[in-house]
Amino acid sequence: MKQFKILFSIAMLFLAISSAGAQDVTTVTMWYPDGSSAECRADIIAEGFNAIDPAVHLDIVLQANTWDATRVAVVGGGGPDIVRTPGPSFVYEMASSGLILPLDSFADEMGWRDTFFPWALDLGLVDGELYSLSDELETLIMYYNKTLFAANGWTPPETMDELIALAEEIEAAGVTVFSHGNADWRPTNEWFVGEFMTQIAGPHNVYKALTGQIPWTDESMVEAMETLDMMMERGWFGGGVDFYVTNTFDTNLAALGSGEAAMNIEGTWRFGNINDFFGEAADNDNEWDWVSVPSKTGEDLFTIGMGNTSSINASSAHPQEAAQVLTYYFSPEVQAELLAACGKGPAPVHLAEDAMTDIDPRIARAYADLSAANADDRYGYTTWTFWPPRSDVYIYEEIERVWYDEITVMEYLEGLDELFAEELAAGDIPPIPAR
Amino acid sequence: MSAVGKISLRGGLLPRRGARERSRLLVFNHAVLILLTAFAVMPLLVLAFNSVKTNAEIGLNPLGPPTQVIAENYASAWERGDFATTMGNSVVYVVATIAAELVLGGLAAYALARRKPPGSDMLMLYFLVASTVPVWMYIVPLFVQFRAWGLLNTMHGLVIVYVAMNAPLTIFLLRSYMIDLPGELEDAARVDGANEFQVFTRIVLPLSKPGFLTVGLVVGLGVWNEFFLALTFIHDPSMFPITTSFYKFTDRFSRDWALTSAGAIIVIFPIVALFLALQRQFIEGLAEGGVKT
């Protein structure tokens, strides 16, 4: 009996110690989009954070179709502590409904205002308060088959006129000019609309239109859309509109890699798998490289976009700890590691100069140039980040009617102008950083 | 001469022409059937081809046979998609849902078909209307309720959702089947002293076997392929169903089609194997039902 009492006391003591220990650890949950590089990212984030502070444990759940699951859970009063959305334009309604917390006090306390580019924090403002931190800085660039260019004596163009002249040469050589197509993702169309607006009409005119200072029917916008329409009409985009709507991403990339096509205007997200279509992996001897999409003036302009955002759930029991996780996640060191190890586009934070020494120099150059463009006022706007939702859908759906000659460029822009004016009046425009 | 010729043509050649026409018709029928078969088989063949190609080859040659067979795609898909976990989970979801659906739906259908309680027509109308409401209309309240009941992130919680979602279809199908069964057999059983439960289990159930098989197949396939509800109610990867495995092969604007195709074959295989193993029972069940009704 005495032995039993001693054993029981030891057991109770052990239980008390272990339960006390368990109570001290706060768990912060984060749902992260599943995908081919998701485990790499989750390992770096969770293992790194959990090694720092034993009192706070970060639990990352890799979720397929994260956004649908997240919004149902958050609206239902549950969900993860850290709420990720597909972009700044999705934050507005969550903030207006009180589903996510304002972050201004955390930004001051944890030094986020020094970590992020100033314009990037502005993207998370709703009615003057910070609600989200933008992540995965991305831009569109022009990939080209370097081996094909060298074999034909072509040089990458710097201006829109040079691009058009080169396209005629490429066409004459029997090569598809751009390996473009939207069969996998219809909003692919908007990449080109936004890009041509920035590169031809110029980022300052786009800014004026986004802030309601000039209409979308401005002469500069008409010129941009007519150039885009001309390229589609001449069959430069994947062989013409009928092919364009049936070309998949793999078809496009395989054509670029094999030399059947010469160029491709796509996002920096393509760095993740472009090597599958060049060299040994694709059984060819070709190499790729990239240049900025040629502008009308010859200036290197980069449209900026955000892949997603992070906020703190209003029903989180541990907002302070969630903010600690965000501080760690958005630190330049972790962002650099995620870029180098997993190919993740970095958040718009001030990366250290040596942050990209271990990555493919072509990729490092892209992010360095993008960063320089942001600093030098040479940035433009991606439609999915800066346009209000209905106008955004209009942009990529209705442009097909222009390509099919059902409406004119002017009719397309008039429709956009009308819809945009409604959304502007309703206050639905995502935050546009002042320039 | 011509008249004689015509007569002799009619008398002597017509039967032979009929045989020729029949054989022409057979050739035509076979051609149509071969085309329809090709229409059904070609996508599966293309899927099988693409499951052993590289992504670059899929891009250049999306429909043809592979120039080089990359069998490792299957092992990579199995490992990266964590099919060992997700397939086991889906089997649990399917079996549990079918079992609950057949027991509960079968009893409900019998009651509505035979006992006709007051308001049964209204109840059927309610099922019909409720089954047409899109899931987005009630997903949030359902989530809130499940959270309050502690059913989130549990396998039995998800099974309850699946059973409820499939109940109207099950009850409709089984009720329609049972309503056509001859009532004399049930009356005879009652005369022999069978109670209502015995009538159901000994008479109605065997006669409704084709109906139950059909419901099991439809519900089972639906649950096997379900994705959205699973992601809404389950947040623990160890309980994810098989459909989530495909997301391991995607990124924002790219998909590994080689692994996706290999994964699709892995997902289809158990269903096809099960159907082939049970096809005799399916056909016998249908034939049996036809004779008895």
Image: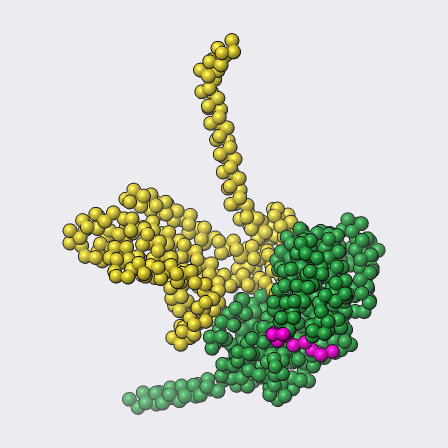
- Residue A208, given in percent of the width and then of the height, sits at 73, 73
Query: In the image, which residues are magenta?
Result: A425-435
Q: Which residue appears at 70% of the width and 52% of the height?
A: A240
Of residue A99 and residue A285, the one placed in the foreground of this image is A99
Instruction: Let me know if residue A52 appears in the view.
Output: no
Q: Residue furthest top?
A: B1
Counting the numbered discs, the total is 0
Is residue A374 shown left or right of residue A391? right
Q: Quadrant of the C terminus of chain B?
A: top left
Q: Colour of chain A?
A: green
Instruction: Let me know if residue A408 appears in the view.
Output: yes
Is residue B150 shown left or right of residue A409? left
Q: Which residue appears at 56% of the width and 69% of the height?
A: A33
Image position of A136 with respect to B281: above or below: below
Image position of A345 with respect to A264: above or below: below
Q: Which residue appears at 56% of the width and 64% of the height?
A: B248
Q: Which residue appears at 34% of the width and 49% of the height?
A: B210
- Residue A131, given in percent of the width and then of the height, sits at 59, 80
Based on the displayed image, in which of its 4 quarters is residue B108 positioned?
bottom left
Based on the displayed image, in which of its 4 quarters is residue A30 positioned?
bottom right
A430 falls in the magenta region: yes
Of residue B104 and residue A17, the one placed in the foreground of this image is B104
- Residue A5, given in percent of the width and then of the height, sits at 32, 89
Is residue B67 shown left or right of residue A220? left
Image position of B134 with respect to A369: above or below: above
Q: Residue furthest right?
A: A153
Is residue A156 shown left or right of residue A117? right
- Residue A14, given in percent of the width and then of the height, sits at 41, 87
Color theme of the render: by chain
Magenta-colored segment: predominant secondary structure:
loop
Which chain identifier belongs to the yellow chain? B
